[in-house]
Structure formats: C-alpha cells, structure tokens
Image (tube, rainbow, N blue to C red):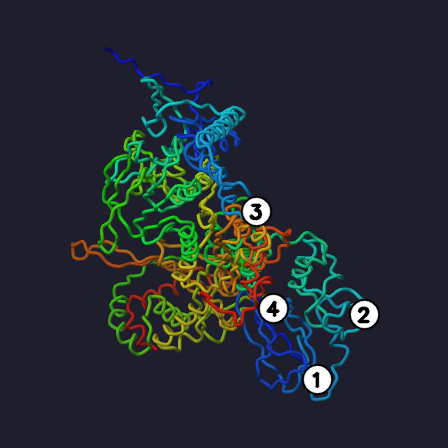
C-alpha cells in the first residue's frame, strides 16, 4: 500500500520548509531509510529518508517549493501499485479538490489546460516581467513552471520581447557559475549586464558592493533575517527580561586552560577556548537551577529533560545558535570538539535542524570585540541567555599592594515569567564560583 | 629694473576655471571638449600648434604622404598601366598638400573650441601650485587658476646620444615631413611603428631604405606572427632591416652621413646614406612644467597615473604620451575622455586591453588585446583562428593579397582575447574587433555576422569561423588543435 512521505515538524518555530532537492525521481526504486529529499529551513538543511521501501509513486512539490510542515511531500508505492488520485491534488498551487482540475498526470513539457502550476519564484518573476505564464513551457514535475522556465522564456526570441540586456560572455559566465541573472544590475551601456557584473555577483566582491550600494535601497529580508526578526520581537515583547551582571576573575581558568592546552590538542585535536569552559560551567549550574532550562507554555512551565547549551554564531548575514547536547554530561574535550565542528558547519550553513532546535540555554560571547558587557534578548522559547564581554586587566588591592588580574564581565538575561531576580542571581553566583575555581568545579561532575 | 607681480587671470567671471588642460594634442583637446560638453569652464594652454604631434608632425601628415605614395606604388607594380615610366611625385606639392590638410584640421579644432566655449591661450605652461598655472608668452607671465588640471603635453621626437639631430642630414621625424627633396638613400634608426611607417613611405618614393633596430624584432609590441610576416614583406619590397643592431655613431662624409653600427654578435659595420632619420622612442614633454613644485609622482621619465588618469596630486590628471602607457593618439584621446569624465564626477577606468594598436605600413597592421605569446605565458586555455588575405576575393581583386587575420579566444569561454591583422585596411578592420570585445561578444558572435560581399571585413568573420574549424573559404583541417595550433 502507499506510504506517505511527510514533511516532519522540525520544531516549534518552523512553519514551512523549502524543498532543496529531490534525490529520487518518480519511478525510482527506494529503500527504507534511504535519503529521499533535502529540505531547508532557517538556513539549516536536512535530509528526509524514505519511510518505506518501494517505488517513488509521485512527488507532490517541486524543488524550490515552500511546503508547510506535516504535509505529504511524496508517496511511496509498491511495485505495480497506482498512486491514489487524492494525493495528486495536494500538490502546490493545486485547486481545491471540488473543482474539476487539469489531468493530474500532466506530462513533462505538456501544457496544462487548467490553471497554470508554477512555483512562487516563477510567479513572482513572471509578474515582475509581465509574462503570461500560460505561454511558458514548464520543466518541473507535473508541468510545474519553474523560475528557470520563466527566465528561459524571457531570454528566448519567441517571447517577442526585447532580448535581455546581457553580453554573451556574461551569459556564459553566469551559466558556468550558476549565477541567477535576476536582480543583477548591469554596469555596461544602458544597464547591460557584463561579465564583471556576474563575477561580482558570484564573488566576494559582492559583500563590498552590497554595502556601498545599500543606501537608499529597499532590501527584502531573506529567510534567516525574517526568522531572526520574528523571533527576537516575539521574545522581546512576550518575555519580560531581567538583566544581571557580574565580574568573573579569569585568572585560574586561563591557567587551567594553559595546562590542558597541549594535552587537548594532542588528545582531541582542538584548542580549548574560554567558550568551552562557559558551556560546561553553565550546564553544571543549570543542574542546580532547572528553571534556567525551561519554557513557558500557557500557564505551564516546561522544564526540558536535557541540558543542551547553545552557542550564538555570527554569520555574514545573520546569526545562528547550534547547541551542544547534554553538555552537563560531556567532558571538556568533547565539548571543545563539538563546538569547533558546530561553529564550522554553522558558517558553511551545513547544520542540521535538530542541532539548532535542541538548545535549551544560550551562551553569547562578544569577547573578540572590544565590548565590556552587553545585554541579550532571550532566544525563545528559552528562559536564560548568558553574555560574555572581553577579558581585561583590572587593578585590585592585595595586602596594600596594587596588583592586576584578568577579569571578564558576564551578564545573564532571564525570562522573569519563570525566573525571579534572586534565582537568576543565585544561578550567576554558582556559575561565577565554578568559572573562578575551575579545577574544583569540574571535579564535581 | 622692477618686476611687476604676475597678473592673475581667472577668466571672465572672476572665478577659477573648472579645468585647465595643458596641451592641445589629441589627448588635451579631446579632454577639453568632453569636459565642456559636461558643463565645465575649460582653459586650454598650447605652446605650439593646435592638434599636437598627431595633427602637425605625426598621424595626419604621414597619412597624407602615404595616400600620395600608395597609388604610385600600385601603378609601379601594376601590369595594366602603360606609360608609367615617366610617372613621378612632386615632393614639394606633396608637402604643400600636407600643410593644407594640417591647417584645415587645425582650424577645425579652433572651431570646436569656439563652439564649446573653450578658452585657449598660447604659451609654455608651468605649475605655480597644484591649482595655479603660469603661462609665459613673449616674455610675459600670466597666471591662471583652475580646480583641476589635465597634463597632456605629449612627447617630442626621439633622440639617440651617438647621433645629434641637425635638421639637415640627421633628421627628426618632424624634420623629415618638410624635406625638400626625396633622398636617394635613408637610414632609419628605430624599427618601431614610426620608423617602419617612414620606411614604407620613402621606399615607395624610390629611396633606398635601411632600418636599424636595437631590439631583436621590429615592432616589438606586436604579435610574433605579424612581425615575422611584415618583416618578410618589407624585405621583399627591398627595405633592409638590421635588428639587434646598435648605432654607435655617425659623421658627415661628403654629402652623406656615415653611420657606424654594431651587431649583437659584436661585429661592426658601416652604412652610408644621404639622410638619417631618428625614429627612436619618443621623449615625454615634462620639462618646464615644474612638476616638482606640486610633487607630482613620476613613472620613469613619464608622469605616473592610475587607471582613472589621476596623478598622486589631488586634482591633477595626466593623459597621452606624457604618461607613456600606449603612445597612440587614440589612446591619448580615450585617456582624455576618461580624465575629463572623472573630473566631472564619473568614475571611469581605462582598460588598455581594449585599446587597439596600429601601424600604417604597407600593408597596415593593427591589433587589440593579447598577443599569442602573452596568452601562452599566462597559461590560458586558448585557440587560434586564422584567415589569409589570399583567400579573400576582395583582397585578391584589389591587388592586396598580402596579409592575414588572426583571432585568439578562450577555448571554453569563447572570450576574444586578441585579434591581430596584417593587411590592407587592417587599421579600419580592427574597429569591429574592438567593438566585439567591448560588448563582450564571444568568438562565435564575431563569426555569425553577415558581411557584405566582397569586403575585407569578411576576413574577420572567416578567421572567427576558423577558430571553430568551420571556415568556409579555407581547405578543411583535419584535427582541431588546442593551445597554439
């Protein structure tokens, strides 16, 4: 019997995912557990495996489609089995089942007589360029018009429109580098797109020119920016924040780090960082104060079973927080290894969804900048976030002698709906003791 | 005696000029007109003639001579004319016609200045500050203020230490344009575009010509294949070419000059000629400008500029031969336009890869972009297409079968890297190749153009087709070859 491939619910904030790539085509054989498609959400990508062995009976959403979670994306059938008609109608842009529709099994390239199927990007481009979609030859599954089809139509002579203003070399270069021509500002005569424009769009020069060209422009938010915007406002306007600050004497921690450095490099092939100590100490402090590992849901406080400490990672165009699972149970070496791997993949946009979704508390460090201290907005639905500024020399008196010590300022933001000031202060106090006495603290495992 | 303080002239409205241009050659006058078109108040300072070297002692005068000698040469080698034995050129009339042409064109520049409201003063200019220029004429100095200054002072005819130009037997390229009598024999020192051009002209006038070049090749900046072929053609015409040969000195002997030279092998020799033409590399005109007052940075003997034609001094630009990048009139004009537009608020860079070269030899040569040797040195993946003039109906019919078109383009991208033409009309034909490169056409674009028949322009399309090994008018080739072919 037919088995549905369902887009999983990837976490509370994920509403839709984008289908990046189908790894199988209709008619392909597939084994249970074999990767079937790649999806993307909030700049994390993940593979969905086939829930059953059989044949890919039908694919309901083309690549590039935004699909709400829990929807059926494909149907796996057994040999000789026919895909039930009902599934065909679920696909994107399909009219309600009550209206008579175009034959669902529209062949590739054949023109649908009913409403035109097109992915949103194709519709957008068509609307912008005033293209009649019914004239565009679709190449997507089930006669769905893809964005590239509209581009091809625009570029073709049959469209009867003026040819796109782009030089031959630029067009070749764009094809070679896979650069989309949409939105590229031509610098040639009368806005003609030249090779340098394509190279710029493809290359690193992009960042610079982007910055220079931004004044007076309207910038559409990309997916990540939209998520950050929505979640940060949600957090700022629903969770009443309180902020607590304390100084951390870093001397002992830096000494311990110095002692273990060489050994860690040999044994774990990583250099332990101050962040690793923070993650570990936070996890241990959370054990004592479970409310810092909780979420408000209606009138209930849900305390998460695992202590998964996230680390905020700045990207070129945003921010992402991968989390180290059960950090309270892990050794410092393992934490360091996981931290290096997660940060690296975050920058390459290669994180898995669960790695981002599992966080229960966040650490955010601006120690690399000349920032003394800062406040942070809670990463919803978490109830605590720790901030760390730069480490600096501080003068102090000892036996009438002026001495210096390394001090970092650390801040805690908590959701006052769950955590009161005194609890937050006690948590921060416990954290301070651990970080200032690392050898003692980590013996308490 | 008391010296009265220099009068400061700031133009009719009392405010400084937007732009002062020093030199009214093809770099300066073009910059001035472009700037005026964009609304600038422009002052041009010229110490000599409007039009500079190009119009007065270079491009234009030599083209007059060339156009006069070309029919004579054609008739001489033609088998269809009769009674050609008595045919000769009147050099005096030729020089007169040259002078008429030059004066007509110079008047044209004056008219253009007037219509663009460009103020032109005569005299030698020198910097008093980065925004002030003193102009000396008839012993009096006037001072002019301008917000931006374009130095376009050009270059003067080259010299060589062992031989001093006397204007009688040892001539500069300026002197030779007003030569009263066709010399029986002529030694040209310098085998660059200028030297070879005069060699062609005087050979056609019946002079025995010898070219002495210090470098291993004549026209050293051109493609090897073009150089080799042109040298063969010139030698076939009876011009003697001595490469890798240095002139050691010269002395008058009777009504001739005796030139002593040394070959690379160390072997010495002597040449005797009625006239010697010094056509070595030209010298930039920076003397008297007092560039050190403004601290202008130099690039050897030339003024140093960036791709925007800016010198290191704020508001001071330089274009043309004085910067020594590509010493062609059209390069100077292109640089002039860029300087003017940059001053007027645009942001433009020059791209010398898309500036053609040309030499008015017989046959002509012209090129744009990379030479094959450069493409190979840069380890580019490229392919070459060729088409010989001998296979062109037009070229053969016109009695100009000597020459070829050579196109170099990236194997994968089809990007046109360079085009090299030797042959009749080469300097005109290169235009469409520059256009193709400017528009970033691929080599296939150049091949797909339908050309009128019969035209020389067909050879370009055929060479581009040959790049894809589908040239119609050439015997089929067996294997498409990569790299050099």
Q: Which residue is mark 1?
A: A2
- Mark 4 lies on a secondary structure that is strand
User: To which chain does the residue with label 1 belong?
Assistant: A
- Quadrant containing the N terminus of chain A is bottom right
* Secondary structure found at label 1: loop
Foreground of the two, B285 or B145 = B285
Residue B315 visible at all:
no
- State the SS at label 3: loop
Left or right: B215 in relation to A363: left
Q: Nearer the viewer, residue B91 or B382?
A: B91
Earlier along the polypeptide chain: callout 2 or callout 4? Answer: 4
Question: Disc 2: which chain?
Answer: A
Q: Disc 2 vs disc 1: Cβ atoms closer than 8 Å?
A: no
Q: Is residue B290 left or right of residue A232?
A: left
Q: Which mark is residue A17?
A: 4
Q: Which callout, 2 or 3, points to the residue nearer the camera?
A: 3
Asked if badges 1 and 3 are on one and the same chain, I answer: no
């Amino acid at each position: 019997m037919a088995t549905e491939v369902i887009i999983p619910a990837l976490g509370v904030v994920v509403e839709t995912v984008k289908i990046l790539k189908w790894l199988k085509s209709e008619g392909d054989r597939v084994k249970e557990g074999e990767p079937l498609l790649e999806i993307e959400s909030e700049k994390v990508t993940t593979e969905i495996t086939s829930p059953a062995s059989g044949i890919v009976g039908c694919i309901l959403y083309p690549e590039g489609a935004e699909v709400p979670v829990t929807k059926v994306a494909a149907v796996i059938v057994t040999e000789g089995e026919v895909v039930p008609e009902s599934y065909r109608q679920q696909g994107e842009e399909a009219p309600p089942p009550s209206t008579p529709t175009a034959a669902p099994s529209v062949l590739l390239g054949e023109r649908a007589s009913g409403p035109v199927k097109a992915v949103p990007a194709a519709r957008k481009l068509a609307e912008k360029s005033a293209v009649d979609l019914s004239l565009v030859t679709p190449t997507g599954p089930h006669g769905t018009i893809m964005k590239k089809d509209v581009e091809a139509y625009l570029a073709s002579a049959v469209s009867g429109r003026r040819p796109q203003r782009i030089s031959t070399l630029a067009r070749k270069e764009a094809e070679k580098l896979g650069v989309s021509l949409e939105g590229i500002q031509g610098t040639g005569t009368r806005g003609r797109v030249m090779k340098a424009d394509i190279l710029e769009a493809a290359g690193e020069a992009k960042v610079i020119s982007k910055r220079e060209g931004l004044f007076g422009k309207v910038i559409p938010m990309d997916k990540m920016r939209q998520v950050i915007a929505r979640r940060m406002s949600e957090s700022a306007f629903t969770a009443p924040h309180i902020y607590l600050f304390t100084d951390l004497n870093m001397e002992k921690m830096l000494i311990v780090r110095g002692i273990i450095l060489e050994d860690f490099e040999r044994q774990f092939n990583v250099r332990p960082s101050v962040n690793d100590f923070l993650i570990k100490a936070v996890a241990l402090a959370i054990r004592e104060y479970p409310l810092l590992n909780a979420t408000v849901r209606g009138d209930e406080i849900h305390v998460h079973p695992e202590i998964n400490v996230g680390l905020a990672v700045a990207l070129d165009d945003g921010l992402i927080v991968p989390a180290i699972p059960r950090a309270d149970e892990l050794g410092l070496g393992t934490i360091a290894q996981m931290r290096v791997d997660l940060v690296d993949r975050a920058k390459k946009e290669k994180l898995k969804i669960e790695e981002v979704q599992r966080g229960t508390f966040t650490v955010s460090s601006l120690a690399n900048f000349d920032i003394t201290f800062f406040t942070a907005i809670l990463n919803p639905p978490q109830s605590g976030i720790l901030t760390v500024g730069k480490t600096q020399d501080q003068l102090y008196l000892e036996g009438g002698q002026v001495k210096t010590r390394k001090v970092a300022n650390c801040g805690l933001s908590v959701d006052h709906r769950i955590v009161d000031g005194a609890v937050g202060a006690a948590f921060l106090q416990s954290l301070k003791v651990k970080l200032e006495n690392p050898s003692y603290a980590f013996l308490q495992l | 005696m008391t010296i009265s303080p220099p009068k400061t002239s700031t133009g009719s409205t009392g405010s400084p000029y937007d732009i002062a241009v020093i030199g009214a050659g093809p770099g300066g006058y073009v910059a001035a007109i472009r700037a005026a078109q964009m609304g600038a108040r422009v002052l041009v300072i010229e110490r000599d003639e409007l039009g500079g070297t190009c119009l007065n002692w270079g491009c234009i005068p030599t083209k007059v001579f060339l156009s006069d000698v070309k029919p004579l040469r054609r008739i001489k080698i033609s088998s269809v004319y009769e009674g050609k034995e008595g045919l000769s050129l009147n050099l005096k009339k030729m020089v007169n016609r040259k002078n008429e042409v030059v004066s007509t064109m110079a008047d044209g520049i004056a008219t253009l200045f007037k219509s663009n409201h460009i103020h032109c003063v005569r005299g030698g200019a020198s910097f008093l500050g980065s925004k002030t220029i003193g102009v000396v004429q008839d012993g009096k100095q006037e001072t002019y203020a301008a917000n931006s200054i374009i130095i376009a002072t050009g270059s003067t005819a080259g010299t060589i230490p062992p031989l001093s130009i006397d204007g009688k037997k040892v001539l500069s390229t300026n002197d030779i344009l007003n030569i009263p009598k066709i010399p029986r024999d002529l030694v040209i020192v310098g085998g660059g575009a200028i030297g070879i051009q005069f060699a062609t002209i005087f050979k056609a006038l019946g002079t025995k010509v010898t070219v002495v070049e210090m470098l291993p090749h004549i026209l050293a900046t051109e493609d090897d294949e073009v150089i080799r072929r042109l040298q063969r053609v010139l030698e076939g015409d009876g011009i003697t070419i001595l490469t890798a040969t240095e002139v050691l000195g010269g002395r008058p002997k009777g009504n001739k000059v005796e030139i002593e030279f040394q070959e690379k092998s160390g072997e010495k020799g002597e040449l005797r000629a009625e006239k010697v033409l010094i056509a070595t590399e030209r010298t930039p005109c920076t003397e008297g400008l007092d560039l050190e007052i403004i601290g202008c940075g130099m690039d050897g003997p030339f003024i140093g500029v960036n791709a925007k034609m800016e010198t290191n001094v704020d508001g001071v630009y330089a274009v043309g031969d004085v910067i020594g990048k590509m010493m062609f009139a059209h390069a100077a004009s292109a640089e002039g336009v860029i300087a003017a537009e940059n001053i007027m608020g645009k942001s433009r860079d020059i791209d010398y890869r898309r500036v053609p070269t040309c030499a008015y030899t017989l046959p002509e040569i012209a090129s744009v972009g990379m030479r094959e040797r450069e493409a190979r040195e840069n380890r580019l993946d490229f392919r070459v297409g060729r088409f010989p003039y001998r296979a062109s109906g037009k070229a053969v019919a016109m009695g100009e079968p000597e020459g070829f078109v050579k196109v170099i383009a990236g194997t994968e991208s089809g990007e046109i890297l360079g085009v090299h033409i030797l042959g009749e009309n080469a300097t005109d034909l290169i235009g469409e190749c520059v256009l193709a490169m400017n528009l970033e056409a691929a080599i296939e674009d150049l091949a797909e153009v339908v050309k009128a028949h019969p035209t020389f322009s067909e050879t370009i399309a055929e060479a581009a087709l040959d790049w894809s090994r589908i040239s119609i008018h050439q015997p089929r080739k067996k294997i498409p070859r990569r790299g050099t072919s």
